[in-house]
Amino acid sequence: MAMTAYRGADIFDGKVRRSGHALLVDGESVRDILPQADVPGDARLMDLPGGLLAPGFIDVQVNGGGGVLLNEQPTIAGIRAICEAHARFGSTALMPTVITDRPEITYAAIEAVGAAIAEGVSGCIGIHVEGPFLSRARKGAHDPALIRTLSEEDLERILATTVRPMILTVATESVTPRQISILAANGITVSIGHSDATFEDAKRAFAAGARGVTHLYNAMSQLGHRSPGLVGAALDTPDVWCGVIADGHHVHPAAIGIALRAKRGEGKIMAITDAMPTVGVDASVFELNGRTVRRSQGRLTLDDGTLAGSDLTMIGAVQYLAGTVGVPLEEALRMASSYPAAFLGLEGERGALAPGFRADMVWIDDALNLRGVWIGGRRLPRTG
């Protein structure tokens, strides 16, 4: 296959933005970024009328999309539908997420993700298991009847799984520091969420090996001047990653800005969607653990008004961060690509446009509209 040189658009490689350069793609991988005058004569030219080429987005928390909720369809077909729906909005890689449910559903989802990866389902790179080891006090939309503590039997069963990367969201109330250490030692990324943890509880969890916080601000103990809570501990701990749902409903833009300025440790706040089945389809109602969720004016809620995931896409998150929160575009793009890659331990292969990296990329215009998406060097037929 001949190499393809993409030119005409600026190129953001994950670190710097270049004009007057071409992106050279060889098969599924990036070969080089070089001045347009240096493009090899045998390369196939792809001229783009302006805009910006950037690394494809990586979403570490995706409950559903394309009319599919992973909990309801924990199958290869369900995972493929979710990945295809989000790819149209720039997510070239994602972590299908199974929320609190019965054990047979949780492990069916893990098995299905493993099978999807083995089959080469485009975009599926691992699994996020959000619950059931959470706190009822901060349950959010999770079914309290299904929330429980992590037993030794649960621990052994989780350790026996082989899907990696795996994120496991837990509450400090439902796991011990010892269990966190064992999980982390076995390659599982432990994230604290849906927790009423004290500042001290959270710090102990981080010291034990927890590396992340699931949807910062939402469903967790808040930052108080005498009790900093999980929010305070997350912002105060340099090596802890924080996901944030940048949709205008879950977190006030000022709160996102404050977190970005306050976070100790650079590049540790990521964009996530926490998306539900409504992404990419017209349907505005779905079932979650036997309860009805409705979409109205961009919000997804249970009948009691509780937010139940989001209707957000990653391009939507980038647009909100850059346009409403005021994050520089290059940083918003890093929050959607290179930072999630680093959180998952994939920074050597994804999240940047650099020699040897996968040719996963997005093309956006000056108004931040998505114009094109490529996964492994292959352009998707429809985007946006």
Image (tube, rainbow, N blue to C red):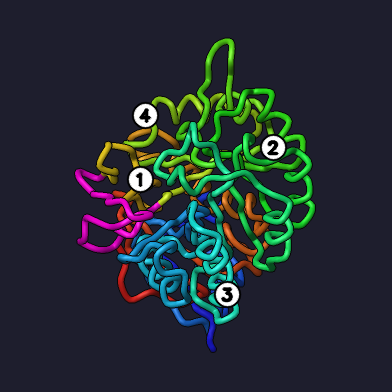
Can you identify the residue that label 3 sits on? 117
Label 1 Cα neighbours within 10 Å, binned few <14 / some 14-19 / many ≥20:
many
Real-space Cα separation, disc 3 to disc 2, in angstroms? 29 Å
Residue 332 seen anywhere in this rendered image of the structure:
yes
For the view shown, which residue lies furthest in the bottom direction?
Answer: 1
Whether pointer 1 and pointer 2 mark residues with C-beta atoms closer than 8 Å, the reply is: no
Residue 41 seen anywhere in this rendered image of the structure:
no
Circle nearer the N terminus (4, 1)? 4
Can you identify the residue that label 4 sits on? 252
What number is the disc on residue 239? Answer: 2
Real-space Cα separation, disc 1 to disc 2, in angstroms? 29 Å
Q: Nearer the viewer, mark 1 or mark 2?
A: 1
Circle nearer the N terminus (4, 2)? 2
What residue lies at 23% left-to-right and 56% top-to-bottom? 285
Q: What's drawn in magenta, residue-wise?
A: 275-298
> Secondary structure under badge 4?
loop
| Amino acid at pointer 1 | Ala
Circle nearer the N terminus (3, 1)? 3
What residue lies at 51% left-to-right and 28% top-to-bottom? 259
